Image: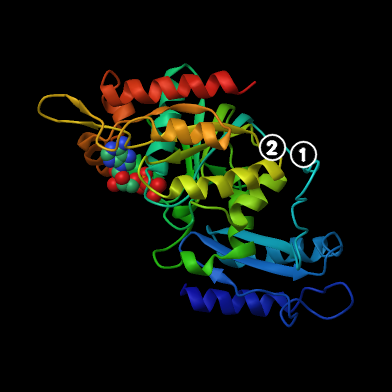
Amino acid sequence: MADTELATQIKAALAGVEIPGGGDLATYAGLSEIIVTPGAVAFAIAVATGMEAAFGPARDEAHKLAQDLAGSRKVMVSITAEKSPAPKFGHGSAAPQGKTRVAGVKRIIAVGSGKGGVGKSTTSVNLALALAAEGLRVGVLDADLYGPSVPKLLGIEGKPAIRDDGIFTPHEAYGLKVMSIGSMLVPGQAVVWRGPMATSGLRQLLRETDWGGLDVLVIDLPPGTGDIHIALFQQTIIDGVVIVSTPQDLALIDAQKAIDMLRRMSVPVLGLIENMSYFIAPDTGHRYDIFGSGGAEKAAGTLGIDFLGPIPLVMSIRENSDAGAPPMATMPEGREATAYRAIARNVLRRIP
Ligand code: ADP
């Protein structure tokens, strides 16, 4: 069925859903656009703060009606309070009140960066593989809505399977369980999935996936600090955040902003990884500190966080990653893998 036709049909069905205070959902001003992608149907119901529970039955009914029409597509219906309560900034910082763990996942490590293009996703994937090489059961959740590259890095295509009960079965690659927000989008549609839609989409990927018992889930965050970060950190117990930066860029300055936000939201910062730290010549194997060495380590000191280690700038990291063959999996004895493994051990030492 054409996407617009399905959206119209669902909207028509929502006319039969009664909402608190009278009226129906189809004509309710708080109903968002109904987004239909090849794999998903998503819409949100904005309600006044405090009315979330009252709208629960309407949401459930809407979900059922939409699912009846959507066939194999995954339906995501979220209720969003119009003004989400601001994270408690200031002294005393917010206690992890209301934050919960994810079923089937023991620990969550999130990987962030001040800006895009610093190698955050590449680092997430190889860090996950390095953690798996330590004997842990590991998953990756690609939450980088604006540049979901994990499927490509791991050579994954298509959508995750959905069980009869609506729960996702993650992809598997190189022994990792993998979910990506990218597989729920069609190219060019990322912009539509802003704000509440993106955060509730991510919440469902995180919580409605059968992770099958993981020791660690690595979440590849979007760069910077935005709605996705705030929603995730408010709702979920994150055991630590790792920040990726390159030596020469201003991302180090942005990192300060990210770290301030994390502290205010009571999310532990595990430390800083310096990516593209030094160059290894492909012909001789010699190391060149082309950006001067120790920049990130010094910056970590200034920021008051730990330095987790450097990753070299190596052509093979880019070439293999582009081909869906991460160096940590395909060249486990290589220099790159050694660097990722050392960082993985540093990370593990810092989580309880
Ligand atoms: P981000 O997630 O921060 O946007 P990516 O992980 O997509 O960044 O990396 C950006 C580009 O840099 C990719 O082409 C990737 O292959 C390359 N890259 C990342 N880390 C390295 C590295 N250590 N050496 C060489 N190339 C790298």
Amino acid type, mark 1: Pro
Q: Secondary structure at mark 1?
A: loop
Taking the view exactly as shown, the residue that stands out farthest to the left is 283
Disc ID at residue 25: none
Q: Is residue 324 visible?
A: no
- Give above or below for 80 relative to 130: below
From the viewer's perspective, is 122 left or right of 284?
Answer: right
Q: Residues within 10 Å of mark 1 (few under 14, many from 20)?
A: some
Q: Secondary structure at mark 2?
A: loop
For this orientation, the residue located farthest to the right is 21
Look at 71% across and 45% down and name the residue there. 264
**Residue on which disc 1 sits:** 96
Which image quarter has ligand 1?
Answer: top left
What residue appears at the point 76 percent right and 66 percent down from the top-left corner? 83
Gap between marks 2 and 1 measured at Cα: 7 Å
Q: Residue 294: x percent and y percent?
A: 38, 30
Q: Is residue 33 left or right of residue 188?
A: right
- Residue 200 quadrant: bottom right
The answer to which of marks 2 and 1 sits earlier in the sequence is 1
Q: Pinpoint residue 277: horizontal percent, then vertical percent.
A: 33, 34
* Left or right of residue 350, residue 343 in this image: left
73 and 195: which is toward the camera? 195
Cβ–Cβ under 8 Å for marks 2 and 1: yes
Using the image as rendered, state which of residue 117 and residue 107 is in the foreground.
117
Quick check: 99 above or below 31? above
Q: Identify which residue, 246 or 26, lies in the foreground.
A: 246
The x, y position of residue 167, in whole percent, is: 60, 45
Between marks 2 and 1 in the image, the one whose residue lies nearer the viewer: 1
Residue denoted by label 2? 237
Total numbered circles: 2
Query: Which amino acid type is shown beneath numbered disc 2?
Result: Ile
